Image: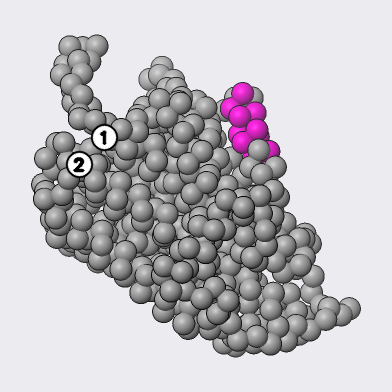
Amino acid sequence: MTINGWLQIAFYLVVLTALVVPLGRFMAKVFEGELTFLSPVLRPVETALYRVSGVDETREQSWLTYTVAMLLFNAAGFIAVYGLLRLQALLPLNPANQSAVTSDLSFNTAVSFATNTNWQNYGGESTLSYFTQMVGLTTQNFVSAATGIALAIALIRAFARASAKTVGNFWVDLTRCTLYILLPISIITALFLVWQGVPQSLGSYVDATTLEGAKQVLSQGPAASQIAIKQLGTNGGGFWNTNSAFPYENPTPLSNFIEVLFILLISAALTHTFGRMVKDARQGWALYAVMAIILIAFLAVTYWAEAHGNANFATLGIDPTNMEGKEVRFGIANSSLWAVTTTAASNGSVNAMLDSFTPLGGLMPMLMIQLGEIIFGGVGSGLYGMLLFVIIAVFVAGLMVGRTPEYLGKKIEAKEVKMAMLAVLCLPLSILGFTAIAVLIPSAVASIANAGPHGFSEILYAYSSQTGNNGSAFAGLTGNTLWYNTTGGLAMLIGRYFVIIPAMAIAGSLVGKKIAPASSGTFPTHGGLFVGLLIGVILIVGGLTFFPALALGPIVEHLAMLTHSVF
């Protein structure tokens, strides 16, 4: 670890925190229907979209209608992407004449992009056409991100409103999120990336000669537009196989900083949006503090582990610092920062190969996903996931002091706690269940590249990433098989919708409740005590569930490394 590395990390955190208030305030205005500086230009477009689609923006929906609309919209997106993949060979803008994608890989990929996971069992440049990337995947990057944000806003309204029956209109929230937030920032970011050297064209592949004299074919394509939204919308799917480690996707230190900043930008700002919409900014800052504290702790361990590397190398007179799988131009500090932020969010992009991290360095990103990806989580999904843990935390606090638990004046009763626990427990059920089955199937075990505990970690990470709707991978696992494509797709569906439906049921229950005024016996949920309690609940409920599995993977691998054992 170096002072320079820590200064770069500190600068990143300062910039992120500074952007929380302006972007959070802007998003609150958008979703509350207030005028913004973009309204003179975009309001006529918004109105025209409602008129064409037959949406009445003044008519709100109950939680059930809102959820059904979301599910139908996501199902349509899945069908559209699946069809594009299967018909790819017949469609235009296919300069490499890519063939149709197999049915199982098409299923996995369509589910992946519909659920904001962007898990990729394929190499983009060797599997997909420009048309598929641009029309299918980039579109889903926008609407899947907008879906998550819309759902978070619906849950926020449930806390903010009293004795109401509706939580908003899904079509209005989806439109406003895409039109006022995602599109403008993405357009500016895409232009910035083009300036930095990212391709944005429909040109043919280019033949190149390497320094060693080898021949190489380089794909081009409309990449900058997809990369902009892949980071901003916490999607993460790479235009090229090596993702943000590839110079076309991430050519400069400046592009690296902007891309990693945008991974957490909206998720962080939504905490302030939450505070403004519930009329108490301190509540939003409390959630931000919880997220920041856990992020910094996990980042410190990752940076320490990668900087110290493998002590066995030192005995051989070799620098133990772990640079394997990392770009020299980014170094250990920026690789560690990216690894932790991308798994804190539901963003599967990488600028270093996680499979090459040290056991403890790889443990931190894996555990970050297993906590539920709520630090800071995906756009929208991180916030509503965090609010589920808040409900559990205030319930625990209520048990300790013998009072009915409350949050923001709303009584938290049996229904809300049951729904929250259902949403939280579905994640370990999917992750551990699929992992347990996979390690017993010879064909599934044959897909791992490493023996011993690291091979187990590759399988555990795969199902953690897919269930957590993250999308990053320990790259040693060959995932493009019938087993992993099918079970991985099911894991992504469980991780997305088995959390969303209980969360929306909670919204439906809370929105109809009255708001009780705070009293001397009210447990404050904006101070240090609550922040500490919430961190404890997250680590105990979210983390200890996976300790036995982690003990079989990265933990035992670390202990074996200390005893000079190899597999």
Q: Nearer the viewer, residue 489 or 324?
A: 489
Quadrant position of residue 388: bottom right
Q: Amino acid at mark 2?
A: Leu
The disc, 2 or 1, on the residue closer to the chain's N-terminal end is: 2
Looking at the figure, which quarter contains the C terminus? top left
Here the colouring is one colour
- Where residue 369 sits: x, y (%)? 46, 56
Identify the residue shown where x is 16% and y is 16%: 214
Q: Secondary structure at mark 1?
A: loop
Q: Find out whether residue 259 is within the magenta segment.
A: no
- Where residue 172 sits: x, y (%)? 52, 68
Quadrant position of residue 310: top left
Identify the residue shown where x is 14% and y is 55%: 87
Q: Nearer the viewer, residue 567 or 145?
A: 145
Q: Find out whether residue 7 is within the magenta segment.
A: yes
**Segment colored magenta:** 4-14
Quadrant position of residue 323: top left
Q: Secondary structure at mark 2?
A: loop
Q: Main secondary structure of the magenta part?
A: helix
The answer for how far apart the CA atoms under marks 2 and 1 are is 7 Å
Report which residue position mark 2 lands on: 93
Identify the residue shown where x is 47% and y is 60%: 146
Please give left or right for residue 262 compared with residue 246 in the image: right
Please report contact status of discs 2 and 1: CB closer than 8 Å, yes or no.
yes
Let me know if residue 226 appears in the view. Answer: yes
Q: Amino acid at mark 1?
A: Leu
Report which residue position mark 1 lands on: 202
